Image (cartoon, coloured by chain):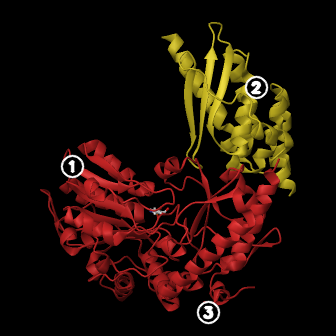
Amino acid sequence: MTSSDSTGFDVAKIRKDFPILDQTQAGRRLVFLDSAASSQRPQQVLDAMDNAYLTSYANVHRGVYQLAERATNLYEGARKRVAGFIGASSPDEVVFTKNATEALNLVVGSWGRANLKPGDAVVLSMLEHHANIVPWQMLAAERELEIRWIPVHDDGRLDLSELDRLLDGAKALSVTAMSNVTGTLTQLDQLVSAAHAAGAIVVVDACQSVPHMSTNVTAMGADFVVFSGHKMLGPTGIGVLWGRAEHLAAMPPFLGGGGMILNVTTEGFTPDVAPAKFEAGTPPIVEAIGLGAAIDYLESIGMDAIRQHEVELTAYALRKLTADLGSSIRIFGPAEPHERGGVLSIELENVHAHDVSQILDEHAVCIRPGHHCAKPLMRHFGVAATARASFYLYNDRDDVDALAESLVAARDFFAI
Amino acid sequence: MSGLEDLYREIILDHYRSPRNKGELPAPPARRTEGFNPLCGDEIVVFVNVDDNDTVTDIKIGGQGCSISQASASMMSAAVKGKTLTEVEELTNSFKTMMSIHETDIGGDDSVTSVESSATRDLPLGDLEALRGVVKFPVRIKCATLGWNTLTQAIDEQRNDTAQ
Ligand SMILES: Cc1ncc(COP(=O)(O)O)c(C=O)c1O
């Protein structure tokens, strides 16, 4: 068992915290390579959520009894942890949502509705997940907006040669920090400064980057950043919108209801200030607490160490798959491990992604086939589907070896 | 890998590697209908020529997909050519019965028996019987039915047009 790589990162120790990984499927060790879709969560997160339900649960914000106060403190404590984790200047800039998708819909539905008028342009990239395409298309259809697309090179890096022209007169740039298909890390520095120079705000879909590397939204310079808890060792049902205080203050509410108002009369309502303004209804209280515990866990390992481990593992995987499968495999995305995250989309010659995943399942290797909610990108690459393997802190070289071995089996099974 | 051999029967792999009636027909006169499997991104395009006697005189299949969706569509194209629309609908129903019983009851031996008995009451499915193993892999049922659903849509559109 390769328990630690040359960086001294101790995967065997980490795996002990993830009971779900300690299982077999038809006698084979389960190899989980689908964290880009949703990660697993450590015992520490499950315990924090259990404890909240067992000892400190009540609805937040409105109770005066001590139990409610404890629940509120835990919920607001999670907000502080998120703020610290992403370098926000205040917890008030952190809005809890259901997931990244809802956070993007919030930005489009609130900021977009308040600021975009017919004829305005919004710039997206060809790498985007449907979550960062469809909400804009919905508003575009209603408001007659123009959507412009930053093209992508064949190796999955964005082609920024026409960036200034694309941004000319645009009101918003909404772009991924890391592609969930190719693993591409986009050139955020250049994107943010070019967009701001053109007078556009910047929305960053950081769903794939926040779980895997250290993030500082203040240094990033964007206006909004979104991500999901379930991809970073947290539970489902909790996502984050970070927004600059001045934007959040100026924006109208998104959903209406309890918890987001200062006053309601028969004539109308006065919204509360952010973040409460954007958190209508009973929030995902225990899910937020779970996310806070996930952040504690990630910080105890260290985001830089996690990133280094994944770069190393990705480099190993690129070498191993190329060596074992040669010309029968096409791996999408940048060749240089430092320019990408631990997401490998592959196409196996003569074997469709769906069939690849089926055969890999027989080897207890969990990967994902499909369009990965990025159909414009798939169409650009000329494929209907890829098979995607993705790594996290609990994966090691043994997992990559199992992937390579099962891919060889898939290729051979379908060989004529 | 006994399960896998049930799924990937030799005849299925044969249709996948050498799909019958692959390609396009000039549309019009052919009817062109697209089908999508939103789960995996597979896209299929069915081109059909139907004559005045409601007979499928030609059919071609385009698009991309996995072995199951491609093989199923290939077998379907071979099976429906020369049949009337009513016959095609009957065949489609028989095929879907074979595929769908397991959507409510997955896997167990009892349900396999019930499939056998119900299918034999319907039209003989010939080569298509090879796809029976798909029902043990519930997520793949949508792959096997993609071509058929697309053809059904084409036929419905054809009927609506001629009714007008
Ligand atoms: C890049 C990217 N953006 C957005 C999303 C949507 O995340 P969620 O489904 O948690 O809202 C995902 C996850 O699938 C993603 O990978």
Both marks 1 and 2 on one chain:
no
Q: Name the residue beneath numbered marker 1.
A: A120
Q: Quadrant of residue A40?
A: bottom right
Q: The chain coloured red carries which letter?
A: A
- Is the C-beta of the residue carrying label 3 under 8 Å from the nearest atom of ligand 1? no
Residue type (three-letter) at the residue carrying disc 1: Asp
| Residue located 39% across and 79% down the image | A215
User: In the structure shown, which secondary structural element does the residue marked by tag 3 occupy?
Assistant: loop
Instruction: State the quadrant of the N terminus of chain A.
Output: bottom right
Label 3 Cα crowd, 10 Å radius (few <14 / some 14-19 / many 20+): few
Number of labelled discs? Answer: 3
Q: Is residue A280 visible?
A: no
Label 2 Cα crowd, 10 Å radius (few <14 / some 14-19 / many 20+): some
The image position of residue A103, as x and y in percent, is 36, 64
CA distance separating discs 3 and 2: 59 Å
Q: Nearer the viewer, mark 3 or mark 2?
A: 3
Q: Chain of mark 3?
A: A
- Mark on residue A8? 3
| Residue located 44% across and 75% down the image | A210
- Mark on residue B78? 2
In the image, residue A141 above or below residue B89: below
Q: Chain of mark 2?
A: B
CA distance separating discs 1 and 2: 51 Å
Label 1 Cα crowd, 10 Å radius (few <14 / some 14-19 / many 20+): some
Q: The chain coloured yellow carries which letter?
A: B
Is B132 positioned to the left or the right of A241 in the image?
Answer: right
Residue type (three-letter) at the residue carrying disc 3: Gly
The image position of residue A176, as x and y in percent, is 40, 64
Both marks 1 and 3 on one chain:
yes
Q: Chain of mark 1?
A: A
Q: Quadrant of residue B76?
A: top right
